[in-house]
Image (cartoon, grey):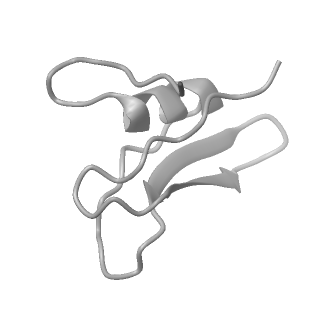
Amino acid sequence: MSEPALRPCPFCGAPGKLFDHQMDQKTTLWWVQCSNSHCIARRQVMDDKGAAIAAWNERKDGTAWTET
């Protein structure tokens, strides 16, 4: 099963980029941030890849985004 597409940045429209950091053998941290180096949009760091993607794709009005 493929992971969901990342929604564009809500502030500048640039693509979102998924990052990970291996803490130890069992723990990987995930976050998504804007790929535009002049934009500071970023979601919180999470220990679940799917949750990090879902958090980035969610908007203030509570709607989740699905690729059409």
The residue at the point 85 percent across, 42 percent down is 25
Q: Is 62 left, or right, of 65 in this rendering?
A: left
Q: Quadrant of residue 28?
A: top right
Q: Is 45 left, or right, of 40 in this rendering?
A: right
Q: Quadrant of the N terminus?
A: top right
Instruction: Please tell me whether residue 10 is drawn above or below residue 66 in the rendered image.
Output: below
Q: Residue furthest bottom?
A: 38
The residue at the point 36 percent across, 20 percent down is 64
The residue at the point 47 percent across, 26 percent down is 54
Return the x and y of residue 21 as percentages of the image width and height.
Answer: 67, 55
Return the x and y of residue 4 as percentages of the image width and height.
Answer: 62, 28
How many numbered markers are drawn? 0
Q: Is 42 left, or right, of 54 in this rendering?
A: left
**Foreground residue among 30 and 57:** 57
**Foreground residue among 64 and 19:** 64
Instruction: Please tell me whether residue 13 is drawn above or below residue 61 in the rendered image.
Output: below
Q: Residue furthest left?
A: 61
Instruction: Please tell me whether residue 28 is drawn above or below residue 51 in the rendered image.
Output: below
**Foreground residue among 43 and 64:** 64
Return the x and y of residue 52 as percentages of the image width and height.
Answer: 50, 34
Return the x and y of residue 14 as percentages of the image width and height.
Answer: 41, 63
The residue at the point 52 percent across, 34 percent down is 53
